[in-house]
Amino acid sequence: MTHGAGSELQCVLQLRGVRKSFGATQIIRGVSLDILRGERHAIIGPNGAGKSTLFNLICGRIAPTQGCILLDGKAIAARPAFEINRRGISRSFQVTNIFPRLSVYENIRCSVLWSLGYRYCFWRGVSRLRDAAEKTERTLEAIGMTSRRDAPAGVLTYAEQRALEIGITIAGDPQVILLDEPTAGMSRAEANHAVDLIREVSQGRTLVMVEHDMGVVFDLADRISVLVYGEIIATDLPSRIRRNEAVQTAYLGSAIHA
Amino acid sequence: MTRGDDIGVPSRAPEVVLRQWTTSYRVWLGAASVLLVLPFFPGLGSDFSRSLLSQMGIAAVFALSYSLLLGQTGLLSFGHAVYFGLGAYAGIHLMRAINAGLPVPMPLVPIAGAAAGLAFGMLFGSLTTRRAGVVFALISLGVGELVLAAMRMVQGFSGGEEGITADRGAGPHVFGLTFASQLEIYYVIAFWAVLSAALMVAFLRTPVGRMCNAVRDNAERAEFIGYDPVRVRFIAFSVAAMFAGLAGGLHALNYEIVAADAVGPARSGAVLLMAYIGGVANFLGAILGAVVITWLQVSLSDYTTAWQLYLGLFFMAVVLFAPNGLAGLLLMHVRLFRTGAWIAVLKAYAIAAVPAGALVAGAVALLEINYRRATQPEAGPQLKLFGVTMDTSTPWPWLAASGLVIFGLVALRRSWPLVTAAWRHAGDETRRRGEARS
């Protein structure tokens, strides 16, 4: 990585001294992090390290107590979630978060509408919007759910719902994708399938993910940050993170060799 | 308990089914032609029947607007009559202006109602739709009480409890039509009802209409695909208020009188009842609920003074045993009919119908005897029920009715498992066939 004068341009997402407290408890204790354009960045760390809180701060679900978050150099911290999403950050959830009574197709189509500029349009039939239909089809194909299009999302299998979750996240062509434990609760085969899917859909985009499965992390990530008790103790290439002693003692230990 | 799920898992989402129904213009053409000839059906030729049909049409528009709110956007309102009533007042005042010489044809009166509904919907909606769920429901209740109190105060505008009147016959004639007769006004209502239903269905198919469903399902997730749920709810609320106002305008046209109770909680409750009994999951339910409840309101009151009690019991039964309403029951049986296993279910129904009938008859008898003794002692002990005259001062009617209830309860408990088993069998059958197909 070059960290010369041009590094500001390379950074799509920057966190500067971000802190978050709930009451007297500090969950995030001054995190600074640069996410480079086009990289696949994994955030790992023990349970309760604040990984999900960090995600919630970036996507606007909660506001930081202190510090700033920049997307393309513009401050986004504490903006409403829908506004941050419109600017190009889209996230998935650890607990499946879909529209259960809508069909699979409708789930995806709703997710493409804003990005195509249809906003709160109430004078055009949605089925006449060719671009929305095409984008929906493409996304369905990417997540391999074309044949399940008419099924209500609520009756899908767990693995299917996880795939749909990713579909909703990427449908609007975001520049930054945040995936919160995309393979949690999956069998090995399902997780492998999910890794292929994530690799495919993150082509040409920036991906930030929180993940517990070290196989998945080292398989996918270009760089890894280690979050321990609300602080980032290391950000580096996977091969160096593996050898980093501070990381070994703080967290990885045997997990990495398993 | 029988559930739709027993017939396999539904393979298509509700909106897919709705789309298939309503995109076929034949459905709309069919509905319009039925409405066209309906007042000339045998038995529907009297002014009374045509008035009943007109009431059903008004109720259908009102219930559809409520279904847009509750079923499609997930907003439970206890004050939807506010927009109906204010629309009705706008309508009746326009009618009075027409009576005074304003050259506007009477059939356009509902537009004034819609405009008033939309304006007040946007005004109150901007405050109430910031929150969903319980908070929204409670605020809607508050707004309802507030507007009712206001209407009672501004006597000059509202006429208070007595109401204000207008004459729909005294306006410009269109093609020689005066709109004074019930038949003419029926057609005006039918026209607006079909147009409203089509517009509401069309609204649901626009980008923001789809997002209404998305916000209902998962408001938080909607934020993470770029939509502000508050904004979506506000738009849905305003549109629902507009159509409620339009229904109010039709009400003014139909009755030629509007009183303060038009905005009141009783009417808000009635529309909730209609939408829920019909089924809030789809638009068919709202229409079904409006038709059935209006019919019950009018006809039950002919048979018994305790009709509101029966309406309440009916509502409870639907909420408890058929959470998807009458439309849900209907769709469930349509699905059953397609499986071919319906004969077994029908047999089980026939067996269970005997104790169910006994239970209902016994319960009705007990209710009527008690109601008569408690509220109308002056009418004497003689009570005619199901064609039988009984003397309520003797213990025999009580014993007979109690016997029917007990027999019904016991026998129903024993025969109901037959129904459940038949449904389960039908479900297995469908699954087996589904597997054989794939």
Image: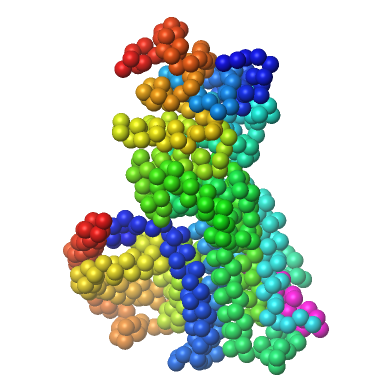
Q: Relative to residue B367, is residue B138 drawn left or right? A: right
Question: Furthest residue to the top?
Answer: A245
> What colour-coding does the image apply?
rainbow
Where residue A178 appears, x then y in whole percent? 51, 32
Q: How many marks?
A: 0
Most common SS among magenta residues: helix
- Position of B418 with respect to A118 (left or right) is left
| Rendered position, B144 above or below A241 | below
Residue situated in front as seen by the camera: B266 or B436: B436
Which image quarter is the N terminus of chain B in? bottom left
Q: Is residue B61 above or below residue A175?
A: below
- Residue B352: percent from the left, percent from the top? 22, 70
The answer to whether residue B417 shows anywhere in this view is: no
Q: What is the x, y in percent for residue A190?
A: 33, 35
Q: Based on the displayed image, in which of its 4 quarters is residue A94 positioned?
A: top left
Residue lying at the far right of the rendered structure? B101
- Which is more toward the observer, B171 or B413? B171
Q: Which span of residues is magenta-colored?
A: B83-102
Q: Specify the quadrant of the image occupied by residue A89.
A: top right
The structure residue drawn at horizontal position 57% and vertical position 80%, both measured from the top left corner, is B190
Q: Name the one closer to the observer, B235 or B47.
A: B235
Identify the residue at image location x=39%, y=83%: B380
Q: Quadrant of the C terminus of chain B?
A: bottom left
| Residue B271 seen by the camera | yes
Q: Is residue A125 magenta?
A: no
Give the image location of residue A157, x and y in percent: 34, 44
Identify the residue at horizontal 32%, vertical 75% (top origin).
B365
**Against A39, is B112 above or below?**
below
Residue B85 magenta: yes
